[in-house]
Image (tube, rainbow, N blue to C red):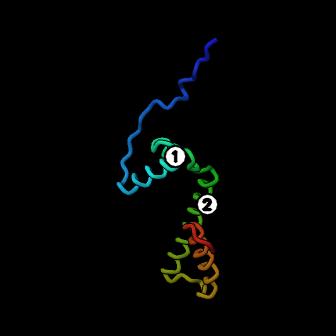
Amino acid sequence: MPRHRDRSSERSHTVRVSVRSSDLIAYRQEAYDRGISVSTLLFKRLNSVRATSVIDAQVARELGHIGNNINQIARRLNMGSTSGVTHEELKPLLDAIAMLRLMLLGGRP
């Protein structure tokens, strides 16, 4: 009895992309070295990219809340409403913000 292929899983649509000449040369070389086509190479790369998770969205929301609080503090300090807060008291907060920023940008603390 012949098998019926599931045509819904076949790659039947073409997508065009423009790349720099230097990138195309590199893609062709890598594809050649791996014994696959450039299309297959790019398809594999595209499918290996990690999707943004829900946790990342939650982290982004929380960072937004933290940023809003920091902006409120900065606004009050800039208006002269320090309520006796000194630079020395703010230094640990500023250091923590700088470290968090570095971590978010991919650096190491």
Residue 2, compared with residue 69, is above or below; it is above
Q: Residue at x 57, y 72 (%)?
A: 102
Element at label 2: helix
Q: What's the mark number on residue 46? A: 1
Residue 51, compared with residue 96, is above or below; it is above
User: Which residue is disc 2 drawn over?
Assistant: 62
Q: Residue 2: where, in percent of width, then height?
A: 61, 14
Q: What's the mark number on residue 74? A: none
The residue type indicated by label 1 comes to Leu
Please give the count of numbered marks on the rendered protein: 2
Which image quadrant for residue 84? bottom right
Q: Residue at x 39, y 52 (%)?
A: 24
Which image quadrant for residue 47? top right
Q: In which quadrant will I find the N terminus?
A: top right
Depth check: 104 or 80 in front?
A: 104
Q: Residue 58: where, in percent of width, then height?
A: 62, 55
The residue type indicated by label 2 comes to Glu
Label 1 near label 2: C-beta < 8 Å?
A: no
Mark 2 crowdedness (10 Å alpha carbons): few <14, some 14-19, many ≥20:
few
Depth check: 29 or 61 in front?
A: 29
Q: In which quadrant will I find the C terminus?
A: bottom right
Which image quadrant for residue 107? bottom right
